[in-house]
């Protein structure tokens, strides 16, 4: 009898913690982290991006003959202007499972198209570089990948990829 009460008490406690967490998550929807970036944030991001590009340009030692290819490359890899519109919570809740899957499939198709365009731009620019510049490009690209994907579990572990 005591064991059953203890298990029930633990279960109720766990459910209440879960409910509090879900309530806090639902209320967090109006926080600044979930809103569109302000003009000040966009300007700060653009400034950081310009500094990184200038450093990359200097590290690559782009020649005047390569400048056009560099500018073309930057134009092609530029992030998309406006983020993709997602359905709101109410709209998402009204959708059926197949509609949600269709929405997710469209998102992935657009992401694949953007990745294919960026891949083509990298290959095109890479072909213009000298072997020394290609090594510098590879190093910058590794850092960029780690910056973008490192927090998602990629690039963690030892040199052989194992934890």
Image (cartoon, rainbow, N blue to C red):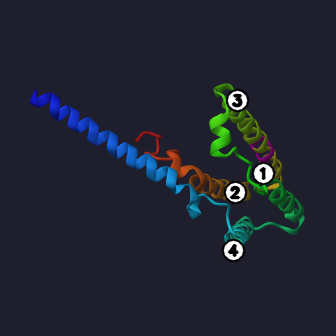
- Crowd band around label 2 with a 10 angstrom C-alpha radius: few (<14), some (14–19), many (20+): some
How far from the left and from the top, in percent, is residue 9?
21, 37
Q: CA distance from mark 1 to mark 3?
A: 41 Å
User: Residue 105 lies in magenta, yes or no?
Assistant: no
Dot 3 and dot 4 residues touching (CB under 8 Å): no
The CA span between labels 3 and 4 is 36 Å
Label 1, on which residue? 126
- Give percent across and percent down for residue 50: 73, 70
- According to the picture, the residue beneath numbered tag 3 turns out to be 99
Point out the frontmost of discs 4 and 1: 4
Residue 41 appears at what percent x and percent y?
67, 70
Q: First in sequence: mark 3 or mark 4?
A: 4
- Which circle marks residue 40 in the picture? 4
Look at the picture and state if 48 lies above or below 75: below
> What are the residue bounds of the magenta stretch?
115-119
Q: Nearer the viewer, residue 110 or 160?
A: 110
Mark in front: 3 vs 4: 3
Q: Nearer the viewer, mark 1 or mark 3?
A: 3
């Amino acid at each position: 009898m005591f064991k059953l009460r203890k298990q029930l008490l633990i279960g109720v406690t766990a459910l209440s913690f879960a409910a509090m967490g879900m309530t806090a998550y639902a209320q967090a929807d109006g926080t600044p982290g979930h809103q569109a970036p302000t003009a000040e944030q966009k300007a700060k991001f653009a400034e950081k991006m310009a500094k990184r590009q200038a450093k990359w340009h200097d590290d690559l030692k782009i020649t005047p003959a390569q400048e056009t290819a560099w500018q073309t490359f930057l134009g092609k890899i530029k992030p998309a202007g406006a983020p993709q519109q997602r359905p709101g919570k109410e709209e998402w809740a009204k959708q059926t499972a197949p509609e949600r899957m269709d929405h997710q499939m469209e998102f992935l198709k657009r992401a694949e198209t953007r990745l294919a365009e960026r891949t083509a731009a990298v290959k095109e620019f890479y072909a213009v570089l000298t072997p020394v510049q290609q090594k510098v490009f590879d190093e910058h690209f590794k850092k960029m990948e780690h910056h973008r994907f490192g927090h998602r579990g990629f690039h963690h572990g030892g040199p052989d990829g194992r934890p």
